Amino acid sequence: QVQLVESGGGLVQAGGSLRLSCAASGSFFSIYTMAWYRQAPGKQRESVARITSSLNTDYADSVKGRFTISRDNAKNTVYLQMNSLKPEDTAVYYCNARYLTDFWGQGTQVTVSS
């Protein structure tokens, strides 16, 4: 069982930056593929960024060049650095851990004002 706790969300003006963190409990964090998803009001949850156990990353087209996912296995933490934020990035951001099954955090709100 893995418990995930996100932090770092908030209100920021367009063009600003935020750094989200997701702290994981439990063992074997390094073997999990970690990801960030987001869900805007009235929309489906969508994948934002992913990082594998071998540090391969991929991003949604809408955030490429602006967001960076990273992980610190010693701290059992995954990060999402978000730069050049846009109002359309406004959503609840969820941390996900995947190894044979999915684990989810409770989400953190990101609001970007124009």
Image: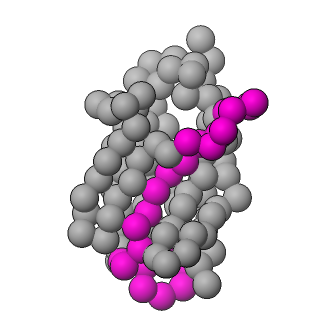
- Nearer-the-camera pick, 73 or 40: 40
Q: Position of residue 45 (x, y in %)?
A: 63, 43
Judge whether 63 appears above or below 57 on screen: above
The residue drawn where x is 66% and y is 48% is: 108
Q: Position of residue 31 (x, y in %)?
A: 36, 79
- Nearer-the-camera pick, 82 or 34: 34
Residue 10 visible, this angle: no
Q: Seen in the image, is 16 located left or right of residue 69?
A: right
The residue drawn where x is 39% and y is 54% is: 50
- Nearer-the-camera pick, 91 or 47: 47
Judge whether 14 appears above or below 51 on screen: above
Location of the N terminus by quadrant is bottom right
Location of the C terminus by quadrant is top right
Residue 2 falls in which quadrant of the image?
A: bottom right
Asked if residue 35 lies in the magenta stretch, the reply is yes
Q: Position of residue 48 (x, y in %)?
A: 46, 43
Residue 74 falls in which quadrant of the image?
A: bottom left
The residue drawn where x is 69% and y is 32% is: 43
Q: Position of residue 79 (x, y in %)?
A: 43, 54
Q: Seen in the image, is 60 located left or right of residue 58?
A: right
Range shown magenta: 24-46
Judge whether 111 appears above or below 5 on screen: above
Asked if residue 36 lies in the magenta stretch, the reply is yes
Residue 107 visible, this angle: yes
Q: Residue furthest right?
A: 42
Judge whether 101 appears above or below 39 on screen: below
Residue 64 falls in which quadrant of the image?
A: top left
The residue drawn where x is 66% and y is 39% is: 44
